[in-house]
């Protein structure tokens, strides 16, 4: 059996049996031997399942540990069947009517069935029952883990029945197999009926090719005749495969026109397994013609192969999970290696990589790049007066402001201590100065709730805010000086522009801090100066004497 999933897949429980993709219903089909036409439960997050169509009850969404349970009866007018397009309904009725008519005609021939044929039929029926009962749990697990076409081994029995049994008995074998598959697949009834019709029709088509060809299933000793039988069986297997693909492909195209046919054809490995399964069915059919106990001899190997497939699927799923976890871990490590944990911005390594990459791209496109060198004013006094936790809180707030004020394509990082570097993509001088002013104003108006070195709560404020009623040191301690430079105006490389921005930053500090300065220009008259210098720290930490020259670390 092959299962084809169309639509998104998420973790959890089944969302519903009708998913929506691109504004239209999207379906998860499966069918008996080839695996199309019915629902395969997926682990989605949900609490309800819509009405099921031709069925009488609605099943709960299932988890791995929860059994199905009937919840309510669905009125006929609420069946999902009526939500399908008229063309889909017409196609379903056409296929099902044609298959039903052919099946009824073959069932009328059961009166002429021999005792040996009944023994062969009984052996195949028992083998199918044992096989599907033994692998039920494994098949449910494989279906849940399958992200694409799902292949099972039931075509071993149905194709063998098409070869070795009269038409009526082959019909009964296929229908019995579908009845046993239903609890495993847990599909909507009207889709189950259509997929069953597709499988039954392909089985009857294979039966017709084999039994109407005139070739004997027993060896004749005539090379041409015996080789002709091989060609007939190969043709029957090909038509069995094609009939299911064609009917389900047409149905999917009618119901979901956006679906590409290649999505349910399966991979090379899937089709190789399907060919192998049909080949095993052909060999079993030939064996049954020699002795009716053939299916009983093959049931154990088929169960073992099914177990091997389940183990392989579990290992593949485990490896996929490991690879996914490894990829996530790698991404996390790469992010951590480029991220400053204190501010959430890039660290020096991240700046070196992403800023240079951005500058190179802008240079290639002929666009300017603006560099902002930002330094917090008197940051050492914050650490000395209120302690390092307060300083860390201020750094975190500045990081938040930069992330908020900058565009997604810009690069911002902490360049050590209280220094920050911002690289603005495709930004000229005028726009860069405007962005720098917005950043400076936001920092000067910031409010940071933190604790001092004695674990007392304190709220530090930007220097643009009015003074408060707090006792002790003035808590208006937050502001920044910013230097602005542009590539290529201040150098044809990011390093030269950063050097120019640093020089402008020193000018801003020398002119009173809390202002923006542009490299190569004197805009000191337009700068906003500090309202007043901070008072000295507490008596247990004496400040260093300030000289005539303002250092960047101040």
Image (spheres, rainbow, N blue to C red):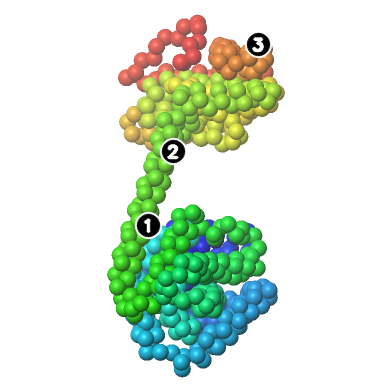
Residue 29 at x, y = what percent? Answer: 52, 67
Measured in 3D between alpha carbons, the distance from the residue under mark 3 to the one under mark 1, in whole angstroms, is 67 Å
Where is 247 relative to 418, above or below? below
Q: Residue at x 39, y 23 (%)?
A: 383
- Relative depth, front residue between 255 and 301: 301
Q: Is residue 269 visible?
A: yes
Q: Residue at x 39, y 45 (%)?
A: 323
- Relative depth, front residue between 490 and 359: 359
Tag in front: 2 or 3: 2
Residue 299 at x, y = what percent? Answer: 32, 72
Residue 320 at x, y = what percent? Answer: 40, 49
Instruction: Return the residue at label 1.
Output: 313
Instruction: Return the residue at label 3.
Output: 520
- Label drawn at residue 331: 2
Where is 529 relative to 464, above or below? above
Quadrant of the image occupied by residue 141: bottom left
Quadrant of the image occupied by residue 430: top right
Residue 412 at x, y = what percent? Answer: 53, 28
State yes or no: discs 2 and 1 in contact (Cβ < 8 Å). no
State yes or no: discs 2 and 3 in contact (Cβ < 8 Å). no
Going from N to C along the chain, the mark reached first, 2 or 3, is: 2
Left or right: 291, with 266 as reference point: left
User: Considering the numbered disc 3 on the image, is that residue within a helix, a strand or a loop?
Assistant: loop
Where is 329 relative to 152, above or below? above
User: Considering the numbered disc 2 on the image, is that residue within a helix, a strand or a loop?
Assistant: helix
Badge 2 crowding class, 10 Å Cα cut-off, few under 14, some 14 to 19, many 20 or more, is few
Going from N to C along the chain, the mark reached first, 3 or 1, is: 1
User: Considering the numbered disc 1 on the image, is that residue within a helix, a strand or a loop?
Assistant: helix
Q: Is residue 252 visible?
A: no
Q: Quadrant of the N terminus?
A: bottom left
Measured in 3D between alpha carbons, the distance from the residue under mark 2 to the one under mark 3, in whole angstroms, is 41 Å
Badge 1 crowding class, 10 Å Cα cut-off, few under 14, some 14 to 19, many 20 or more, is some
């Amino acid at each position: 059996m092959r299962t084809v999933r169309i639509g998104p897949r998420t973790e959890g429980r089944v969302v519903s049996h009708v998913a929506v993709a691109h504004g239209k219903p999207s379906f998860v089909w499966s069918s008996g031997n080839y695996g199309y036409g019915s629902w395969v439960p997926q682990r989605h997050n949900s609490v309800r399942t819509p009405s099921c169509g031709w069925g009488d009850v609605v099943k709960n969404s299932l988890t791995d540990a929860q059994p199905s349970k009937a919840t309510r009866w669905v009125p006929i007018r609420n069946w999902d069947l009526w939500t399908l397009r008229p063309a889909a309904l017409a196609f379903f009725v056409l296929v099902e009517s044609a298959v039903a008519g052919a099946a009824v005609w073959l069932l009328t021939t059961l009166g002429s069935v021999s005792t040996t044929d009944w023994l062969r039929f009984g052996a195949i029926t028992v083998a199918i029952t044992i096989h599907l009962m033994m692998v039920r749990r494994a098949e449910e697990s494989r279906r849940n883990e399958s992200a694409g076409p799902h292949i099972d081994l039931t075509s071993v029995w149905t194709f063998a029945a098409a070869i070795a049994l009269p038409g009526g008995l082959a019909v009964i074998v296929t229908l019995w197999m579908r009845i046993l598959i239903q609890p495993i697949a847990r599909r909507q009834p009207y889709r189950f009926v259509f997929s069953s019709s597709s499988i039954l029709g392909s089985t009857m088509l294979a039966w017709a090719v084999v039994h109407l060809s005139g070739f004997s299933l027993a060896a004749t000793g005539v090379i041409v005749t015996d080789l002709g039988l091989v060609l007939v069986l190969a043709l029957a297997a090909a038509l069995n495969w094609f009939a299911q693909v064609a009917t389900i492909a047409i149905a999917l195209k009618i119901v979901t026109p956006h679906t590409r046919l290649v999505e349910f054809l399966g991979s090379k490995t899937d089709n190789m397994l399907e060919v192998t399964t049909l080949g095993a069915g052909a060999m079993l059919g030939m064996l049954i013609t020699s002795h009716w106990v053939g299916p009983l001899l093959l049931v154990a190997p088929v169960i073992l192969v099914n177990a091997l497939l389940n183990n392989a699927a579990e290992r593949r799923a485990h490896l996929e999970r490991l690879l996914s976890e490894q990829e996530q871990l790698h991404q996390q490590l790469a992010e951590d290696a480029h991220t400053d944990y204190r501010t959430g911005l890039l660290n020096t390594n991240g700046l070196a990589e992403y800023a240079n990459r951005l500058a190179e791209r802008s240079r290639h496109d002929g666009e300017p790049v603006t560099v902002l060198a930002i330094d917090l004013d008197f940051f050492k006094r914050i650490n000395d007066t209120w302690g390092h936790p307060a300083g860390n809180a201020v750094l975190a707030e500045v990081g938040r402001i930069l992330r908020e004020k900058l565009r997604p394509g810009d690069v911002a990082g902490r360049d050590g201590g209280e220094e920050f570097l911002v690289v603005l993509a495709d930004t000229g001088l005028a726009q860069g100065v405007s962005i720098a002013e917005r950043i400076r104003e936001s920092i000067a108006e910031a409010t940071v709730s933190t604790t001092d070195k004695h674990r007392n709560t304190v709220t530090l404020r930007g220097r643009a805010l009015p003074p408060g009623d707090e006792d002790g040191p003035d808590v208006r301690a937050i502001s920044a000086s910013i230097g602005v430079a542009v590539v290529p105006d201040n150098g044809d490389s990011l390093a030269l522009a950063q050097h120019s921005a640093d020089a402008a930053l020193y000018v801003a500090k020398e002119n009173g801090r809390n202002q923006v300065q542009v490299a190569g220009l004197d805009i000191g008259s337009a700068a906003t100066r500090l309202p007043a210098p901070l008072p000295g720290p507490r008596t247990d930490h004496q400040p260093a004497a300030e000289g005539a020259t303002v250092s960047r670390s101040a």
